Image (cartoon, rainbow, N blue to C red):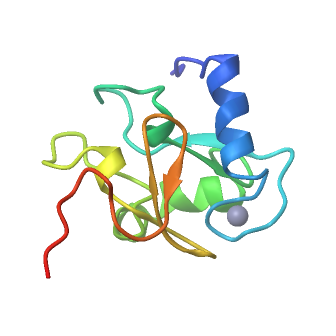
């Protein structure tokens, strides 16, 4: 099966945003790969909110780990349910530097989500 390629400008944005570091283990990964948090069927497969840089490939490193351990990957936000209520931008990922929201414009938010009202 083939996956649609991530457009080159989006891939460059994601690598820049993620500082060429695997967002699960933190290793510097110039040779890593870009993971789709919400797979085929998602609304915006190539939105930066849906993409995250991981070390390895679809079968090795953290990218392989995500696909081999879906329950843990969902819990860490590295996978997002296709038919769920929340979009990838609304589900934080657990990274070595804390919980991070990946936003559609390619930016990130470390603590509170700008699209979500804060209470108390
Ligand atoms: Zn890794």
Q: Nearer the viewer, residue 61 or 109?
A: 109
Q: Residue furthest front?
A: 120
Residue 7: image quadrant is: top right
User: Does residue 45 lie above or below 30 as drawn?
Assistant: above
State which image quarter holds ligand 1.
bottom right
Image coordinates of residue 46 in percent, x first then y, are: 48, 26
Residue drawn at (70%, 54%) of the image: 60
Residue drawn at (62%, 53%) of the image: 63
22 lies left or right of 88? right
User: Does residue 103 lie above or below 55 as drawn?
Assistant: above
User: Does residue 5 lie above or below 115 as drawn?
Assistant: above
Image coordinates of residue 103 in percent, x first then y, are: 43, 44
User: Does residue 44 lie above or below 33 as drawn?
Assistant: above
71 lies left or right of 50? left
Q: Nearer the viewer, residue 82 or 23?
A: 23
Q: Nearer the viewer, residue 58 or 80?
A: 80
């Amino acid at each position: 099966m083939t996956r649609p390629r991530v457009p080159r400008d989006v891939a460059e944005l994601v690598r820049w945003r993620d500082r060429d570091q695997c967002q699960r283990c933190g290793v510097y990964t110039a040779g890593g790969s870009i993971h789709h948090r919400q797979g085929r069927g998602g609304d915006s497969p190539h939105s930066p909110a849906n993409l995250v840089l991981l070390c390895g490939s679809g079968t090795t490193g953290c990218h392989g780990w995500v696909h081999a351990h879906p329950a843990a990957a969902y819990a860490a936000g590295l996978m997002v349910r296709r038919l769920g209520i929340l979009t990838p931008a609304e589900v934080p990922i657990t990274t070595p530097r804390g919980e991070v929201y990946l936003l559609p414009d390619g930016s990130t938010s470390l603590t509170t989500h700008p699209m979500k009202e804060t209470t108390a």
